[in-house]
Amino acid sequence: MPSEPNQEEIEIRPFRIEDQPFLERVAPRIRPGRTASPRDPAALDQFFFDLGSGRLLSEPGAEAFVATVASEPCGLVSVHPDVDYFTGHPRAYVDVMVVAAEVEGKGIGRALMDYVERWARDRSCREVVLDVFAENHGAIAFYDRLGYRPDHVRMAKPVE
Ligand SMILES: CC(C)(COP(=O)(O)OP(=O)(O)OC[C@H]1O[C@@H](n2cnc3c(N)ncnc32)[C@H](O)[C@@H]1OP(=O)(O)O)[C@@H](O)C(=O)NCCC(=O)NCCS
């Protein structure tokens, strides 16, 4: 795999069942450390270790896409059609977004989000939305660089 892929060398195709081992390898990268919600850390870790294609594509209309360089999977995004809670306008919701650690910072995440934005426009969505854990500063910086801004912020306080 070239160390610095050009945007032209990054290809994006639908997720295939053969991509499952790649998904299993990279999905744990999404799991957060501490969260404001009193989630059982082991249960939270398990969620990301168990992230298979069933859960990836559980929402109606969901689709997942894999970025490859030289045919090697190196990133994955999944998205489903959604509507704004308040106004009902159509939007695209990104469920999973992850790039393999060894190829971070080479434009693969941007290529995947560009693809999602085209997917959204093709379906007449007004926006692309996603959730990110508040402590995931790297991902927040990435989305900010791509033009995403905080919309609503969920506050949590354990009462146990
Ligand atoms: C967040 C993530 C998807 C970014 O993917 P990536 O391929 O490294 O990102 P890119 O190389 O396409 O970067 C695109 C832009 O964002 C910036 N960026 C990416 N990661 C950044 C970081 N941690 N801090 C600051 N800026 C960052 C890049 O500098 C680049 O800006 P530029 O084009 O102006 O140079 C990747 O780091 C990842 O998989 N993280 C772990 C999983 C995760 O947290 N997923 C998100 C869950 S909501």
Image (tube, rainbow, N blue to C red):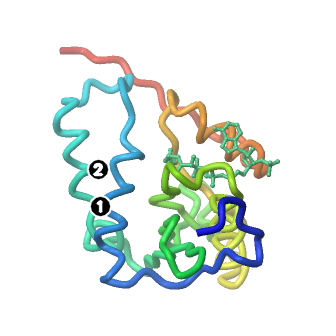
Which residue is at 43% across, 80% downward?
15
- Residue denoted by label 1: 24
State left or right for residue 58 relative to residue 154: left
Frontmost of labels 1 and 2 is 1
Which residue is at 63% across, 58% downward?
109
Amino acid at circle 1 = Glu
The quadrant in which residue 2 appears is: bottom right
- Badge 2, how many Cα within 10 Å: few under 14, some, many 20+? some
71 and 59: which is toward the camera: 71
Q: Disc 1 versus disc 2: distance between alpha carbons? A: 8 Å
How far across and down, in percent of the image, does residue 151 sit?
A: 65, 41
Amino acid at circle 2 = Phe
Which residue is at 48% across, 36% downward?
133
State left or right for residue 17 relative to residue 63: left
Q: Does 74 sit above or below residue 41? A: below
99 and 114: which is toward the camera: 99
Q: Dot 2 lies on which element?
A: helix
- Residue denoted by label 2: 48
How far across and down, in percent of the image, does residue 134 sit?
A: 52, 30
How many discs appear?
2
Q: Quadrant of the C terminus?
A: top left
Q: Does 51 sit above or below residue 82? A: above
